[in-house]
Image: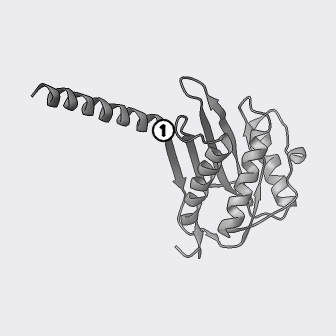
Amino acid sequence: MEPVKKLGGRVWLVVAFAVWLSGCAAGSASHREFVAAPGVVTVGSRLAVMPLDNLTDYPNAGNIVAELLRTELYGQGLFTLSTGVTAEEALTVTSATDKRHDVLARARTLGAEYLLQGTVLEFGYRFGMHDRPVVGLSARLLRVADGTVLWAASESVVGSGLMDRSSVNQVAQQAVRRMVEGLKPLVAGNGQ
């Protein structure tokens, strides 16, 4: 009887270790979203995607995420993307109100009906027992004509760090993909 008890104890130890290990390998995500009204934007409307404000220490995180957003939006076919918005054209002003008006004016000069802008809140690695990629984003879709916010979302993703070695870019792509999925109800005629 004694060998069976020892074996049973080892089995539980192996099971406990496997559960702990699976927790180390899993990432996590948090998502919040607001949609003004479903179907208020038509498929193919012109959209300007501005470089996102970068509140992180990671150089060019705002430009990187803006490029990921453009790629995902292009792939979804929801909007016609306005071109010509680069990091050099991003406006730097002191007041949030001034910035909003300047960015809307820039979107108008590009012929955009809608503007996607936002902020990179976190972009890098969370160091600890296992380095994990982390990305935090917030974004807003505004109607250029009057500055009304039609959609807003925030996304935070923590990648895995032990078994699956995700990069910051992979985690950012996951966050962006999920954000763009949230735009679909806003766009009429998108096949949903």
Type of amino acid at the residue the image marks with label 1: Ala
Q: Nearer the viewer, residue 115 or 134?
A: 134
**In which image quadrant can residue 144 be found?**
bottom right
What residue is shown at x 68% (from left), y 66% (from top)?
Answer: 75
Q: Is residue 115 visible?
A: no
Q: Position of residue 135 (x, y in %)?
A: 62, 39
**Left of 162 or right of it: where is 22?**
left
For label 1, the residue is 25
What residue is shown at x 66% (from left), y 73% (from top)?
Answer: 43
**Left of 105 or right of it: where is 28?**
left
**Left of 14 or right of it: where is 95?**
right
Residue 121, placed above or below residue 154: above
Task: Give the tally of numbered discs.
Answer: 1
What residue is shown at x 59% (from left), y 73% (from top)?
Answer: 190
**In which image quadrant can residue 182 be found?**
bottom right
As helix, strand or loop, the secondary structure at mark 1 comes to: helix
What residue is shown at x 53% (from left), y 39% (from top)?
Answer: 160
